Amino acid sequence: MIDDLGEVVPLRAPVTRVVSLVPSLTEAVEVSAPGRLAGATDYCTHPVDLDVPRVGGSKYPNVDKVLELAPDLVLANSEENRPEDVERLRANGIPVWVMEASATVPGALASIRRILTQAYDLAEPDWLVEAEEVWRETLPERFRAVVPVWRKPWIVLGRDTFGGDVLHRVGIGNVYADDEERYPRPKLEELQARFADEDANLLVLPDEPYEFTADDGPEAFPGAKYVPVSGRHLTWYGPSLVEAHSHLTHLVL
């Protein structure tokens, strides 16, 4: 088997002990094949009743703990996980499937399908088929948004991001979609000017990775229309995509 980055994943049978280093993949595989997770990160919050050993954060997992769990597969992501951690696991004989950080909803769902049907030897789960259907259509653009994902410094969604494609498909354009960077770091004054010049008319504030709230974020953009969104609905590629479409579509009506 070959992962998204073209690396061989030496599996001899459908996996039964998996450690996931990616929160959205954790949810996707546990919902689709319950009971096969042997470990997950501290940030793997879904399913909410998931009871497995924790191996630290996504960016900096405790590789020794992963090795102690003796998984037959580790799931990683090219954007969330460090190459040195992936290489150490492989050097210790642990197969690792690295999912590419997809820039589109269809791309992410196609990648998850490969993991579930090849590594897990499953039929396509119902949630995946439903997600593909609800995200097939792209709605007409209703808003142009600035989408911060961090502050101090301010970091926003730029080109070729999964979250940007999610918003695009529900009719919310990303002001920084054509930027050279995937995650630009504009000064606050530049962001404020986007609203003053009417280039942007919506501020989208997710609750992860930075936890924006009604008291932390909107005050930097006086008078701007803003909407708080679940980071899980905006950036997770898994079963949450089924509900995310209707949630995000109606949030800004």
Image: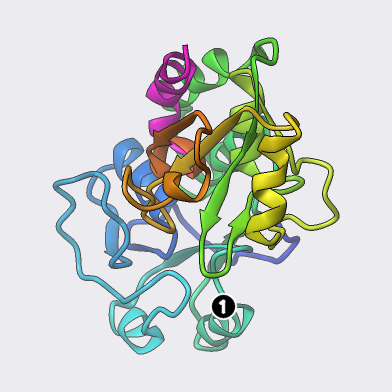
In the figure, is residue 196 to the left or right of 99?
right
Q: Main secondary structure of the magenta part?
A: helix
Residue 2 visible (yes or no): no
| Residue displayed at 19% across by 62% down | 52
What span is colored magenta in the figure? 236-253
Is residue 49 shown above or below 13? above
Residue 156 visible (yes or no): yes
| Residue displayed at 50% across by 28% down | 225
Amino acid under disc 1: Val
Give coordinates of residue 184: x percent, y percent: 72, 58
Give coordinates of residue 140: x percent, y percent: 69, 10
| Residue displayed at 56% across by 77% down | 86
Camera-side residue of 145 and 225:
225
Is residue 50 shown above or below 248? below
Disc 1 target residue:
86
Give coordinates of residue 80: x percent, y percent: 54, 65
Is residue 31 rendered magenta in the image? no
Q: Quadrant of residue 106?
A: top right
| Residue displayed at 63% across by 58% down | 188
Camera-side residue of 90 and 76:
76
Q: Residues within 10 Å of mark 1 (few under 14, many from 20)?
A: many
Where disc 1 sits, the SS reads helix
